[in-house]
Structures are given as structure tokens and as C-alpha cells.
Image: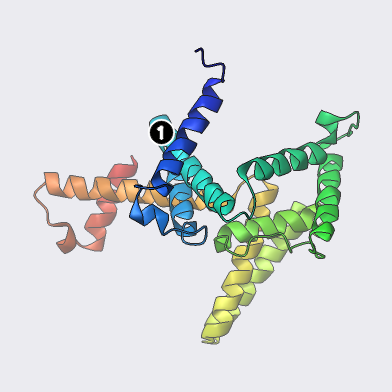
Amino acid sequence: MNDTRTPHAAALEELLDVIEALLGPGGCPWDQKQTPKSMCDYLAEEAFELIEGIRADNAREAMEELGDVMFILLFMATLYAREDTFSLTESLRYSAAKMIRRHPHVFSDKSFDNIEELWDNWEKTKREENRENGRKHVFDSLPKGLPPLLRAYRINSKAARNHFTWDSDEAVETQLKSEWNEWQQALAAGDEQASEQEFGDYLFTLVELGRRKGIKANAALDFANQKFLGRFAQMEALAEERGLKFSELTLDQMNALWDEVKE
């Protein structure tokens, strides 16, 4: 008998069959104890591993981790279905309908003159959806579990889409200088609590300035972290090649190695 399914459908069904076997009679005791809530941390971990592979331009790792994320999503969907809460089909169709509704310029005859009009319509549609779901306020749909730097970007982005932002980049730069001065004043006063709060205000404003320049702060900082770690590892390697004990180097010696690595 010929298999008329598409490769995607066949692979999806194969993965669902694996999950059914794990959860069925004679399956895995650990898997059978899991709940959607217990799987949340694993989903977050796999998502971060996927992001790491993508940002490293490692296609092999991205392929593997994308499959792992998909497995956990399907696993969670199966658990919900077994509880008669909702089915995978319902979830997928709900998402498809939502995307069609939010893209009238693709799925209907509506058109927009510019990207700003498109975003205005997107936000209007989301507000209508949120009201239907009992979410009355602009930020009600913002996940509370987002990492703070990513959350700051999304807050600024969402505020801007609702026309609550500075009039110009120059105005943001002026505000950034003001936040810097307030932080310095708090430091000079020796007020630890105020110093932390003012530093947070400075970071929040810096995130907005980056957003306006097309820079996502979370990704930018991740690249900076990886660059630092890579250079530091090279410093350690150079020290080892030269028979030097890295922990005993002076700051000047470390800086010399750092400059050598940068070059």
C-alpha cells in the first residue's frame, strides 16, 4: 500500500506514534509521570539550546534542537489531549485562524500603505482578541516569564506600537543621558537601592534606543557574551602554550594577551 502522506505529515505522525508508545502500556515510567507543567522547564531548556544553535550558525545543531523542541510540544499536546482538555488539532487550527485574522493583507483584499499601518492593524486585532479572552490591558498578553532584557524590549516595542514612545531618537538619547546622570548621583550618594533602580532605568532606556536602531538587546548581549568567552578561552590557550599559569598572571599580562587575541 502506497503512503500518500507528505514527508512532513509522515514524520509528524511518526513522532506522535513514539509519544503514544512512551505513554502507553509498557512505556516509559518517567514519561508517564509528567504533566504539561512539569515539562515547562524542559521546553525552556530545549528552546535555549535551539537558539544557541541558530545564533552559532550551526545548522546541524539547529536541526537537532528544533526536533527536540517539537517533541516536547507534541508531548505536552498529547498530555492535554489525554486529559480531554484540548486536542493538537484544535490548537493548530486555532493558531492558523489567528494568523489568518492578523494578516488580512495576505488572506483577504485588505492593503496597507506602509509597515506602520500594518502594525496598527496587528495591535488592533490583538486588542480585540485579548478582550474576548478577558485581557483588557495592552500588556496583559506579555508573558511574565520572559527574561528581563527580552521583556524590556517587548515592553518598549509594544508601547511604541500603541504610540506611547519618544518622538525621535534624539529624544531617547537625551533621556538616556538623564538616566545616566541620575545613576551617577545615586552612586555618589551611596544609596544602593536607588543605584540599582537608576541603573535599571538606564538599561531600560538603552534597550529602547537599540530597538529604534534595529538592535535586539537580548541577542546583542548574547553575542557580546560569546565574543568575550571566546577571546578569554584563547587567552588561556596562549598562556598554556607559553608555560604560564593563568591564575598567576598580573592584570597587565592578561591585558597583553587580550590585545594579542583581539589582533
**Residue 79 x/y as whole percent:** 52, 52
Q: Nearer the viewer, residue 87 or 161?
A: 87
The colour scheme used to paint the residues is rainbow
Q: Amino acid at mark 1?
A: Asn
Q: Badge 1 local density, few (<14 within 10 Å), some, or many (20+)?
A: few
Residue 138 appears in the rendering: yes
**Left or right: where 144 falls relative to 45:** right
Quadrant housing residue 184: bottom right
Residue lying farthest to the top in this orientation? 2
Q: Nearer the viewer, residue 236 or 30?
A: 30
**Residue 14 x/y as whole percent:** 46, 31
Please tell me whether residue 197 is drawn above or below residue 70 in the rendered image. Answer: below
Q: Nearer the viewer, residue 76 or 253?
A: 76
**Left or right: where 234 falls relative to 104:** left
SS under mark 1: loop
**Residue 211 x/y as whole percent:** 66, 50
Residue 162 appears in the rendering: no
* Count of numbered marks: 1
Please tell me whether residue 37 is drawn above or below residue 235 in the rendered image. Answer: below
Q: Residue at 68% x, 70% y: name it.
A: 178
Residue lying farthest to the left in this orientation? 243
Quadrant containing the C terminus in the rendered view: top left
Quadrant housing residue 177: bottom right
Q: Residue at 71% x, 39% y: name it.
A: 93
**Left or right: where 97 falls relative to 144:** right
Q: Which residue is mark 1?
A: 58
Q: Residue at 64% x, 60% y: name it.
A: 143
